[in-house]
Amino acid sequence: MRLEVNGTVHELAVADGKRLLDLLRDDLGLTGARFGCGHGICGACFVLVDGQPVAACTTGADEVAGKRIVTIEGLAQDGELHRVQRAFIDEDAMQCGACTSGMILSAVSLLARTPAPTEAQIRAALAPHLCRCGVYLRAIRAVQRAAATP
Amino acid sequence: MNDVGEWGRPPQRLEQRLAIEPDGTVVARSGKVEYGQGIRAGFARTVAAELAVPIERVRIELGETERVPWDMGTFGSLSTATDGEVLRVAAALARRQLLERAGARWRLPVDSLHVRDGAVLAPDGRVLSYAELVAAEPLAGPLPEPSTLVAASIPEAKPFRPEARAIVTGAARYAADVRLPGLLHGHVLHPPRPGSRLRMLDATAARALPGVLAVVVDGDFVGVVAQHDAQALAAAQMMTAQWDAPPIAGAPFEAVLRDDAGTDAALAAAARRVTAHYHMPPIAHATICPGAAVADVRADRTDLYVATQRPFGLRDEVAGLLGLSPARVHVHPQLMSGQFGRGNVGDAALDAVRLSRAVARPVRVRWTRAEEFALSPYRPPLEAWFEAALDADGTIAAWRQRVRTQPHTYGGADVPAEFLLMTAGRNALPPYRLGRARVQLEVAPAQGRSGAFRSLAAAPNVFAIESFVDELALAAREDPLQFRLRRLDDTRLRRVLETVRRRSDWDARRHAAGHGFGVACADYGGTRIAQVAEVVLEGERIRLERVWCAVDAGRLVHPDGARNQIEGGIQQAASWAVLEELPLHEGIVGAATWHDYPIARCPDAPHAIDVVFTGDATQAPTGIGEPGSVPTAAAIANAVCDAGGGRRRRLPLMATVRDREQAPSP
Ligand code: FES
Ligand code: FES
């Protein structure tokens, strides 16, 4: 099967029923998508598939054949952080970081579709991502900061 | 389990704590661990300030049992107050020794010299780097008492978290991310109740599954090792076992925390009596990454890559299990998802150790979400009964309070009484003038895995006390904030109350339809904290609009980190209060997915959390990790009552809504 991950095309033999999350983490060593629940409910494992945030834990590897996948590892270009990553650092919008990969990817997708989102739109975009440490307000500010960054 | 150690003093020698490497990097070592509370950042700032080096040149080593000094564990919001202070003193002593060495070489008086950017400077412009000064002889010596060394002032700086870049790029490693050559994957068949005896096991079908390398049965321990995680999980789910659950052990522990003569008589004689009963359900840690560990057990050494708050406790436990000397067990704490007490037990690490020993290969165990709910410790339920007497002028003349809960620590029946008191009794004594009072505490034996959760019993105790105080204020027809101030002696606690009063414009607050305001406060281990919550009732929904918070935690080492902790504590506690209840039947958890145990999401977050620090920079720092979560539930419940939603004496506040919404869960 053919798969484009973070700009690199992979030819992989994939076992039946393999989840995209296991493929990324175990076969490609991309562990930035975290395992939180396996049910599509917590958002820790989100990646972008053709620009859309999806739960990698409930997505079959076969469903993404031929699609463009971006994981958190693929956002920075030549060591230059994406403005959303930068904004999460500047707002210190993280504590343990377990939810951060997913939140950042959902925010990247939101800003691609909606360059100047309202606060309600930001909250809705971050809604799939559970954060036990409670950094929601900082994450909202980080997305606002990123939106204001050229 | 050896969970309850002494409050051991950290080692007091410079060479155990701090070293300067040939490239000038300052390495500071602590047995504490980082799980998002920002201690690495706080320690780095402290050391950088004392030694006048850029923070990027400070490396903090945390919890690596091979290299850092022994430590009891990371809990109680004590890291900055204890170990942060030790590192500060170590860095200050290092600075003094570096100045003395440079002075000796140059034959110049020490007070003519300065430190800057990792070097000592002479008045004539000569420079000696720290690395040069320690090349012949590393820094060493006993650490003096903190008070003998003046603290360098730490500059306000933009947020700096050493782990931040790794987190936002996905490079951060959590226990489940560790990969060793030849790594295998394991799952364990856990009995529903800890300590159960295995009566019957059928593993025939599991053994035949592809990828399965071993089914490990060792007494009451049953596990499976496979090539891939999914194979091990499938095999574990295919095994059937029957267990004999142990009886619930131990007798209830009872203590009288305060007992004034004449309490009963004063209650009987009072002009007005108010009584109430409060109930807090069990709640789950609900950490985002389920328990995970990689163990590599070999003949000569064992390495463990884990999430733990007690690296040394875990080391000793594993050494005991393997019959090894603790010096041969090396614990490598990884970055971990928010623990808040969760990481005080070894769980997944012990699973991985037993499986790795059995197959003589490194094994990773990563629990499922269902296992994380079922097997990780939870905060036990707490009930509180109150009876208070008010005089005609509103003075509290008498107070009777009874609290019943289960252990807020681990270790079952072996926990010493004073430890039960310190944990279950935390903040059970109200800070107010109460007249004649009796306060009793009962700790019933744990039915399941009850344990320590952020602030221990303080949050439930303060919910009950601060709700009841509100009821008294209403009965006395006094403003609830003023009512508290009039009955408090502690000036620092009064000051945080006065501060939230101003910040929230309490005296001018307006009651639009469905809006309400509530206040609550606490002194948590020396940190004074007060909060005002504003809520809106929308039908049965409770919408938290805003929280104002004032905190006095003495000197702040990392102000934005402290703010992050307080905001997070409030957000987490708002979720506990409004939404959370762990379904539990005789100690067995009835939640398997997040649908069974919803926590607050981003749209539930309030519009703003306003945090101000009122602490005095000359006062020693006190904890900030836990206190934020302590008064929140009462502030919200008091606001709900103020908004016309009635007095709610049971948490969660929105149980009815939750039950209805969760009914059709998949
Ligand atoms: S791990 Fe995929 S949504 Fe939770
Ligand atoms: S920062 Fe810990 S879960 Fe979000």
Image: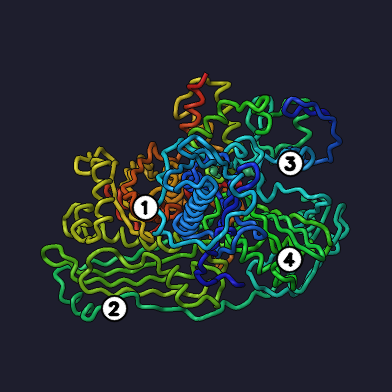
Q: Relative to B144, is B276 on the left or the right?
A: left
Instruction: Identify which residue is drawn at 16% across, 72% down.
Output: B270
Q: Amino acid at mark 3?
A: Arg
The residue under label 2 is B259
* SS at circle 3: helix
Q: Secondary structure at mark 4?
A: helix
Give the alpha-carbon distance from disc 2 to disc 4, as whole Å. 50 Å
Q: Is residue A72 left or right of residue B42?
A: right
Q: Which residue is mark 1?
A: B553
Chain letter of mark 1 equals B
The x and y percentages for residue B574 are: 42, 49
Q: Within 10 angstroms of label 3, few (less than 14), some, or many (20 or more) residues?
A: some
Is residue B65 shown to the viewer in this render? yes
User: Which residue is most to the front?
Assistant: B107
- At label 2, counting other C-alpha atoms closer than 10 Å, the crowd grade (few under 14, some 14-19, many 20 or more) is few
What residue do we see at 25% from left, 78% from top?
B260
Q: Are marks 3 and 2 in contact (CB under 8 Å)?
A: no
Of the pair B115 and A59, the residue shown nearer to us: B115
Relative horizontal placement of residue A53, taking residue A140 as reference (left or right):
right
Q: CA distance from mark 1 to mark 4?
A: 40 Å
Residue B379 percent across, percent down from the top left: 50, 62
Is the residue indicated by label 1 positioned so its CB lies within 8 Å of ligand 2?
no
Point out the tag, 1 or 4, that comes first from the N-terminus: 4
Nearest-to-viewer mark from 2 and 4 = 4
Q: Which residue is mark 3?
A: A25
Q: Is residue B41 visible?
A: no
